[in-house]
Image (cartoon, rainbow, N blue to C red):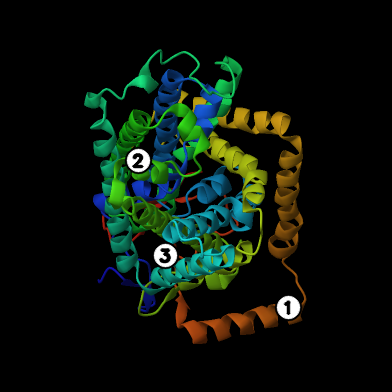
Amino acid sequence: MPGNQRRTEAGEESVTLQRQLNLFDCFSMVVGIIIGSGIFISPKGVLQSSNSVGWFLVIWVFSGIFSCFGALSYVELATSIPLSGGDYTYLRLSFGGLFSFLRIWTIIAAVRTGPLTLLSITAGTYLAGKSAVCSPIAVRLFAACVLCAVTFLNCWSVSLSKKVQNICTVAKMLGLLVIIVAGLAQLPKGTTSSFQHPFQRFPGSPGPVDWKNFPSAFFSGVYAFSGWQNLPQVTEEIVQPGKTMPAAICLAMGFVTVFYMLTNLAYLAVLTPAEMLASDAVAMTFGEAVLGSYWWLMPVAVTLSCFGSINGGLFCTARSFFAASREGQLPHILGMVHVHRKTPLAAAALSLPVCLMMLMIDDIYSLINYLSFSRWIFIGMTCAAVPYFRFKYPHIDRPFKVPLIIPILFALCAFFVVLSSALSDTPAFLGGLTITIIGVPIYFLGIKWKRKPRCFDIIMCRTTRFLQTVFLIVDTQTSSSSTHGRGLSRGSREPLLLEDQDQDDYHHSDSLLA
């Protein structure tokens, strides 16, 4: 049976997503999403809170290790529950439908769409370079073109999307290598002033070295590693996920940590800490100081890096929408696949109108900041699901296991982030809480309320059929209520055990988790 089709009991062929992401694709996806624009633009968040070069570097190392703990916790869940959707799926199975819906609601509202929009603006800004004639409107128009291009790419072909992701990841790796080699080559010339008395306050620092500021520096560092949580969203499209995902995550997190460290060392070899804090675009300042006439390599690298992060983020986020649709928590149309392209076309296109509307907002940063607490609380809840599943379902197959102390520690730290944000920036916390709570009545009206007016059902049905005809998309016939579904019973909180003996098909086992 071909990988893109399989037969139901009635003998009908159903269109499905394929397993076609190998180890390098997964590695490229994680690295490509994590390394966006932050390491190129400004690592000042860690530097201005640590106020010393030594602690600045130490915090980067601990941020990488801590992020790896969270990533490994997600991998255990992904390999023991081989369903796409990532933390959406794990929250639904452990904490119920309301929390999983609020996760999807906040993802649409800003948690994922906001960063995608900012990355597109960053790409436009860097592509403009030193041009003084490029107005903010022109930058946003270019950002809109980037978003439309990436969305079209994800709607058109999964294979082409992963190839572009691989190319962009290699490009950003080469960009970082240019910085590392060019920067560290300055050390033999005696440019070591930044590393003298590393654990003391550097000249021009905004404040003294104070342990009270270290949590803020640590959180800034952890944010720079954000993106590892996206890979489990595409579990059903990964070849041999039980082996591929742990290897890809470990390699990617180790690679990113080493490259981040070397890049920051290269920055400090050329620029003083005060110059790094004063720069809004460290890579551009670095390029002008070291690369001379080849300074243009930096904006090109940043633009490609942003493009790759947008592509990877959109690719993975679409699978969360796809999974939520299968569980009846998003419109049915989002769980359909293009007949010929075998792409989740509707789910991949959902983020575009939201991102385009965000381009008209002056202060996107505030919206993202408002919902940062919800991002952390859902990540913490997801990691807390690891010990829950260990206790609740001890008999399920776990190809990969982490020591329980790892997810417990990560969950506690995530909840501490939420508490600290509530105390340090209460207005932003309340704003984000309000946006999150708005999802509660939407959940009860749109999902829990089953007996809606007949006219509403007719409108939704006709709209779905019209969109199916226009975009040539069909139901995968693998919804969780199907006898050949991908493992979840609609309305149930218990996944079916899945055997992964055949990469191209799924089979129910004889027993349930419960």
Q: Which residue is mark 1?
A: 456
Q: Which amino acid is tagged 2?
A: Ala
Task: Answer above or below: position of 463 versus 363.
Answer: below
> Which numbered disc, 1 or 3, marks the residue that appears first in the sequence?
1
Asked whether disc 1 touches disc 3, contact meaning CB atoms under 8 Å apart, the reply is no
Query: At 60% across and 58% down in the image, what residue appears?
Result: 108
Residue 437 coordinates in the image, percent (x, y): 74, 49
* Residue highlighted by disc 3: 484
Q: Earlier in the sequence, mark 3 or mark 2?
A: 2
State the SS at label 1: helix
Q: CA distance from mark 1 to mark 3?
A: 29 Å
| Mark drawn on residue 60 | none
Q: Residue at x 45, y 65 (%)?
A: 483
Q: Closer to the N terminus: mark 1 or mark 2?
A: 2
Q: Check disc 3 and report its element: helix, strand or loop.
A: loop
Residue 399 location, quadrant: top left
The residue positioned 44% from the left and 39% from the top of the image is 225
Q: Position of residue 400 (x, y in %)?
A: 34, 36
Mark 3 near mark 2, Cβ–Cβ under 8 Å? no
Which label number is shown at residue 289?
2
Instruction: Determine contact: label 1, label 2, CB under 8 Å.
Output: no
